[in-house]
Image: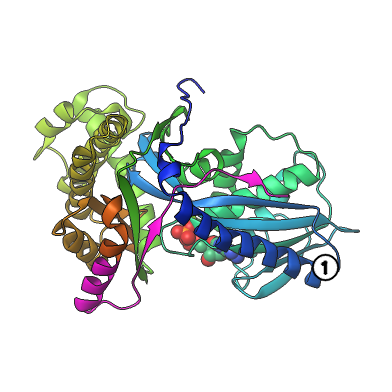
Amino acid sequence: MSFYSKPTTKFSRRVRERVEAEHSVEEDTRRELVRLYREEFGKMPEIVTSAPGRINLIGEHTDYNGGYVLPVAIDRRTYTAAGRRMGDLFIAFSKELGKKTSFEIQPGKFEHSNFWVNYIKGACTLLNEMKQVKGLNFAIASTVPRGSGLSSSAAYVVSIIEAVTRLYGIGLKDTDVPILAQRIENEFVGVQSGIMDPFVAKFARADNAILIDARSLDFKYVEMPRECSLLVCVTGVKRAIATTEYNKRRQQCQDAVAAISEKLGRPLQSLRDVDESELTPLHGKMDQVLYMRALHVVTENQRALRTFDALGEDDLSLVGKLMLESHLSLRTNYEVSSPELDAYVEIAEQLDGVYGARMTGAGFGGSAICLVDSAKESELANEIAAKYRGKGFEGGQVFMARTGGGSQVER
Ligand code: ADP
Ligand code: MG
């Protein structure tokens, strides 16, 4: 990777005690998984792998436009315990879903009733095209909340890929892991997700955010300033329209590329190739909705780059300001926010000790994030949660997120 920088540890030293407490939750999950595997399959797993969930600091709906994203992995992970078995059968057990199912590699068979197993089927089917993959046992356990915009799906699928490639000695390059994970979600699960989620699940480093150029897949790290903490504000809502609206936004961005390209008289590959100064004169001269979508993407790319620099300079006020601008743009220009997400941001904005807040992930529910003064983090987490309930919203949850590292072999 061309602009790799060495991560440091100033963030982790400060929070060691808390991190140790949280590690024990992860340790317990891992241990319980091995116990369950033994109970289900009558022997120890040959391997246990894990991959983290993530929050995107900024750069939302930019990855499929060839732009920039700036996520961090969180210290909540999905664990896969796996081992080879005789024959061609694959058996998978998910602790969280309390479900067990079996399958053989048969391309094209999408499971509606056991939706979650399509990720494993996809991984085994595509890896089998590289080198023969025979029967396997899997047990999965996770501390990443599902369907909350924290990318439990990428954590899950990346941990599966890491396990299968090692058990069958498949020499997949590190950079090909997220690409394969994206293909699995696109082709086997039917979600047109971008590259960001599996990329951060693979390459994240604790204490660091990672700026990813979604076009070239170059990436570089920036250390998180020590004075700040991240709060995750889960809405507890995932709107059914999320997937259709997501796909609609992707289409609108393509249509915007065609419209802008025609107006500018030059070919464009994606919205990444448009500057704000070129776009704004087109206001009123092209379809208004397409203009708004493009305006979000073009300005959001700039915000992601500026946030990366601001983090490097420990300029948390600027980071917070850019986060709020991002939220506003997602709400008014990209129209993917929701009353719950807006409520969290409005609440946070008014509190002392909050640098900034925004929705994170695709929108229409999921989660918001707040960047806060670490000296006040628990106080603010409680206050935000109480105010959210006070506005009549139910099912919310606010928690402090530590940064985590990318996928790894646990044992
Ligand atoms: P998100 O990635 O934001 O959490 P998605 O809808 O993309 O939401 O992914 C959630 C889906 O991923 C679940 O419905 C399930 O199919 C699968 N999944 C995630 N974690 C697990 C798990 N621990 N066990 C089984 N399936 C899981
Ligand atoms: Mg997902």
The residue positioned 29% from the left and 68% from the top of the image is 382
Q: Secondary structure at mark 1?
A: helix
The answer, for residue 318, to whether it is visible in the render is yes
Q: Observer-nearest residue: 398 or 129?
A: 398
Residue 310 coordinates in the image, percent (x, y): 26, 32
The residue positioned 73% from the left and 63% from the top of the image is 34
92 shown above or below 219: below
Amino acid type, mark 1? Phe
Residue 201 coordinates in the image, percent (x, y): 53, 45
Circle 1: is it few (<14), some (14-19), or many (20+) Cα within 10 Å?
some
Residue 124 coordinates in the image, percent (x, y): 72, 51
Q: Observer-nearest residue: 296 or 368?
A: 368
- Disc 1 target residue: 41
Colour scheme of the rendered structure: rainbow
The residue positioned 39% from the left and 53% from the top of the image is 247
Extreme residue toward the right, this view = 86
Q: Quadrant of residue 331?
A: bottom left
Residue extent of the magenta highlight: 382-411
Q: Is residue 322 left or right of residue 159?
A: left
Q: Observer-nearest residue: 350 or 154?
A: 350
